[in-house]
């Protein structure tokens, strides 16, 4: 369109920022892949997108990890954060911004939101005592912990060790926001998804909020509290503010300022409370607009069990990508796990998906039809005759299904039902296979070449639709498929689907090549 660039609709989204206290695992990869698919879909749909991801580098957990590694926190995170960024790159995630909370610009943003909350009268100095979990970077009430036989305690919710801590530190008047938060969940039912998480959060808030400890004095690896030497910010205050930092906050003239409020925070189910309670309360206090939606995806389990170093079942995303390829890993996690629920990874399951859905259903259809075209149609888009009159009922039925996909996909994307998007696309892929098998174009070569051309043209058109729509999920393979169909690189958006961008008969096509190879290996790798 010729709408001026500044009026383009915007979509801002983020992942959580990971603690770089160890190596990234497949759970981290899952989150950034899912967010990347959503970001890429919005770009295809004509949005100006800001997609951020990054690392959460302060706090006691990181400081302790650095000490264990015999190095300074800064040297430590420089090494481990790079691994997280390399993982996002390896997973083909086209983020616009990788934020590290140790950046000076982030310190400025965190200190500015602090000043605004303080100016509002929501921050006060007091004694604070409670059971602190370093692993969760969170305080718990005694009632939220259990006593073990050896006298130590663990948090009930996360089963992590807690230690008694007493400090004079700053508190945030979270209790004052209870009613406003409940009203937010009422007025904006979409604010928290999926619904089960919304209900959990609402009942947590309804049960009463206590003021939150927001500074620390017993260690110094954090953002300094402005005007109060000796205090560093509680790591979650600084971490949540990363979403503002990436939009240039507090500089309103920053070209990315238009992305605040963000449309979506993609996070895991374990940190919904921080994003749906603390974060909106901080923003209300600072007088800033709230993000539109917080979505807590489920956990990726390894063969049904939580990944842990002691179980030895931690999945390394780099290894998986080396073994199966990046697109298959992306497809697998997004197709196999209903977004919002938990899912299980196993080598058998990914091999099954690769060979059935990718190699067989989509890959074979492309391979068979494109090989026929190469041999029988002068390696060019076949001429179906005058459209649409030359198409018969079966052709039109398949094209109608393919042409209806963008609307279906847009709707499901709006609900963040990523697995359903793929299921819907693959339902039409199955239809296209039935169509191709039923029409038997290989028999028409001699008997009715005009009809063969119409069938092949229709099949290629369906493949074009699939190629465009799977770009957010399997970007490299989708690009290969669209290249094989000679779809120009600037005609690959949702707006080019259907009538708007039909293949042009006679367009030369490159030599066919496999889009999705089968996974062939005699033995499965050790799990
Ligand atoms: O929570 N499956 O960092 P983190 C799916 N720094 N997702 C998983 C997962 C799994 N097995 N394990 C973890 C933090 N995640 C904070 C966030 S945001 C301002 C600060 C998800 O490294 C987890 O739910 O522990 C979270 O969304 C993300 O990975 C980073 O987890």
Image (cartoon, grey):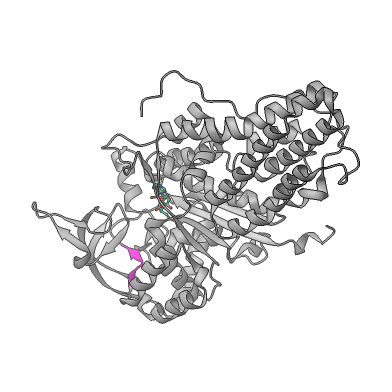
Q: 156 left or right of 115?
A: left
Q: Residue 304 falls in which quadrant of the image?
A: top left
Viewer-side residue, 25 vs 166 = 25
In which quadrant will I find the N terminus?
bottom right
Residue range in magenta is: 212-217
**Residue at far front of view:** 447
Q: Residue 526 falls in which quadrant of the image?
A: top left
Viewer-side residue, 204 vs 332 = 332
> How many numbered dots are placed on residues in this image?
0
Q: Is residue 257 visible?
A: yes
Q: Is residue 225 visible?
A: no
**Residue at far top of view:** 522
Viewer-side residue, 447 vs 226 = 447
Q: Residue 172 falls in which quadrant of the image?
A: bottom left
**Residue at far right of view:** 386
Rendered view: 188 above or below 426: below
Rendered view: 187 above or below 368: below
Residue 429 location (% of width, % of height): 64, 40
Residue at horizontal 77%, vertical 49%?
A: 498
In which quadrant will I find the C terminus?
top left
Residue 319 location (% of width, % of height): 45, 30
Residue at horizontal 56%, vertical 36%?
A: 357
Residue at horizontal 44%, vertical 73%?
A: 281
Judge whether residue 216 is colored magenta. yes
Residue 414 location (% of width, % of height): 59, 60
Residue 78 location (% of width, % of height): 45, 41
Judge whether residue 112 is colored magenta. no
Look at the magenta stretch and give its main secondary structure.
strand
Residue at horizontal 44%, vertical 67%?
A: 276
């Amino acid at each position: 369109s010729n709408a001026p660039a500044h009026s383009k609709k915007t979509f801002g989204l983020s992942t959580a920022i990971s603690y770089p206290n160890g190596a990234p695992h497949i759970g981290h990869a899952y989150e950034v892949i899912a967010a990347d698919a959503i970001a890429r879909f919005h770009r295809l749909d004509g949005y100006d997108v800001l997609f951020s991801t990054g690392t959460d580098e302060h706090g006691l957990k990181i400081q302790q990890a650095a000490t264990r590694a015999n190095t300074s926190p800064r040297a430590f995170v420089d090494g481990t954060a790079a691994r997280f960024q390399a993982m996002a790159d390896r997973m083909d995630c086209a983020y616009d911004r990788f934020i590290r909370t140790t950046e000076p610009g982030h310190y400025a943003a965190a200190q500015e939101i602090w000043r605004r909350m303080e100016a509002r009268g929501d921050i006060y100095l007091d004694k604070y005592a409670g059971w602190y979990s370093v692993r969760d970077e969170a305080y718990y009430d005694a009632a939220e912990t259990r006593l073990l036989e050896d006298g130590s305690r663990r948090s009930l919710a996360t089963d992590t060790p807690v230690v008694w801590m007493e400090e004079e530190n700053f508190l945030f008047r979270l209790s004052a926001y209870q009613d406003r938060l409940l009203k937010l969940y009422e007025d904006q039912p979409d604010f928290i998804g999926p619904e089960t998480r919304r209900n959990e959060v609402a009942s947590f808030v309804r049960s009463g909020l206590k003021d939150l400890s927001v500074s620390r004095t017993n260690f110094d690896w954090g953002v300094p509290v402005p005007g109060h030497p000796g205090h560093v910010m509680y790591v979650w205050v600084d971490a949540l503010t990363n979403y503002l930092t990436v939009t240039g906050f507090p500089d309103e003239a920053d070209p990315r300022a238009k992305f605040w409020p963000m449309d979506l925070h993609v996070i895991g189910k374990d940190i919904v409370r921080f994003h749906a309670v603390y974060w909106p309360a901080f923003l209300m206090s600072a007088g800033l607009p709230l993000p539109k939606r917080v979505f807590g995806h489920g956990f990726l389990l390894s063969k049904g069990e939580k990944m842990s170093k002691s179980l030895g079942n931690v999945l390394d995303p780099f290894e998986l990508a080396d073994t199966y390829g990046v697109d298959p890993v992306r497809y697998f996690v997004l197709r196999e796990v209903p977004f919002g629920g938990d899912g299980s990874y196993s080598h058998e399951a990914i091999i099954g998906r690769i060979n059935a859905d990718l190699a067989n259903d989509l890959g074979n259809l492309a391979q068979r039809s494109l090989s026929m075209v190469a041999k029988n149609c002068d390696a060019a888009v076949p001429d179906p005759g005058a459209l649409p009159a030359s198409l018969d009922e079966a052709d039109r039925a398949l094209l109608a299904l393919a042409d209806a996909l963008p609307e279906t996909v847009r709707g499901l994307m709006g609900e963040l039902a990523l697995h359903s998007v793929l299921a819907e696309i693959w339902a039409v892929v199955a239809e296209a296979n039935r169509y191709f098998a039923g029409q038997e174009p290989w028999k028409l070569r001699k008997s009715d070449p005009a009809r063969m051309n119409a069938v092949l043209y229709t099949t290629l058109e369906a493949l074009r639709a699939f190629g465009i729509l799977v770009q957010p999920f399997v970007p490299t393979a989708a690009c290969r498929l669209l290249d094989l169909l000679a779809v120009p690189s600037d005609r690959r958006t949702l707006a080019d689907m259907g009538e708007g961008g039909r293949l042009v008969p006679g367009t030369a096509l490159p030599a066919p090549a496999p889009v999705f190879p089968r996974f062939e290996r005699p033995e499965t790798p050790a799990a």
